[in-house]
Amino acid sequence: QVQLVESGGGLVQPGGSLRLSCAASRSISSIYAMGWYRQAPGKQRELVAHIGSGGSTNYADSVKGRFTISRDNAKNTVYLQMNSLKPEDTAVYYCNVGGLTSSQLYFNSWGQGTQVTVSS
């Protein structure tokens, strides 16, 4: 199983920025797709941003123009740059990665979640 380690969450004021990182813990042969999801209290988990194997991206309407997803294939890491943060962005953020391990086994893993709180 591929473990994902997230970092970068925290408390930020409205209008501020944070950068989340998610790194895979073992050797990976290929990654199909990487994404960030979030879950606010009392709400369902929702897709925030997604990046495909070819680099194509898509975003939730609520974060378009403010968030940017990127990936470093050499480091098996996906990032989420969050700018102009709003209180409604407060949630636990989870990364999700699917692909093949170095043993050519399919995996789909979730990170442990990192809290992002936007408040003055």
Image (cartoon, rainbow, N blue to C red):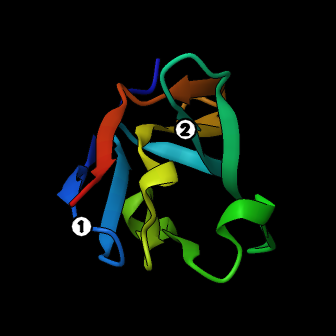
- Badge 2 amino acid: Arg
- Disc on res. 96: none
Local crowd size for mark 2, using a 10 Å CA cut-off: few (<14), some (14–19), many (≥20): many
Give the distance between the C-alpha atoms of the residues marked 2 and 1, in whole angstroms. Answer: 18 Å
Of residue 62 and residue 99, the one placed in the foreground of this image is: 62
Direction front: furthest residue: 120
Q: Position of residue 22 (x, y in %)?
A: 37, 49
- Badge 1 amino acid: Gln
Of residue 68 and residue 53, the one placed in the foreground of this image is: 68
Q: On the picture, is 46 further left or further right than 72?
A: right
In the rendered image, which quarter is residue 74 located in? bottom left
Residue at (56%, 16%) from the top-left corner? Answer: 42
What residue is disc 1 on?
A: 13
The answer to whether mark 2 and mark 1 are in CB contact below 8 A is no
Residue at (31%, 37%) from the top-left corner? Answer: 114
Residue at (32%, 46%) from the top-left corner? Answer: 116
Q: Secondary structure at mark 2?
A: strand
What residue is disc 2 on?
A: 38
Figure quadrant of the C terminus:
bottom left
Residue at (67%, 21%) from the top-left corner? Answer: 44
In the rendered image, which quarter is residue 111 located in? top left
Question: Looking at the image, is 21 positioned above or below residue 69?
Answer: above
Q: Position of residue 28 (x, y in %)?
A: 50, 44
**Residue 25 visible, this angle:** no
Q: On the picture, is 36 further left or further right than 25?
A: right
Earlier residue among tags 2 and 1 = 1
Q: Secondary structure at mark 1?
A: loop
Of residue 98 and residue 21, the one placed in the foreground of this image is: 21
Question: Looking at the image, is 98 positioned above or below residue 45?
Answer: below
Local crowd size for mark 1, using a 10 Å CA cut-off: few (<14), some (14–19), many (≥20): some
**Residue 62 visible, this angle:** yes
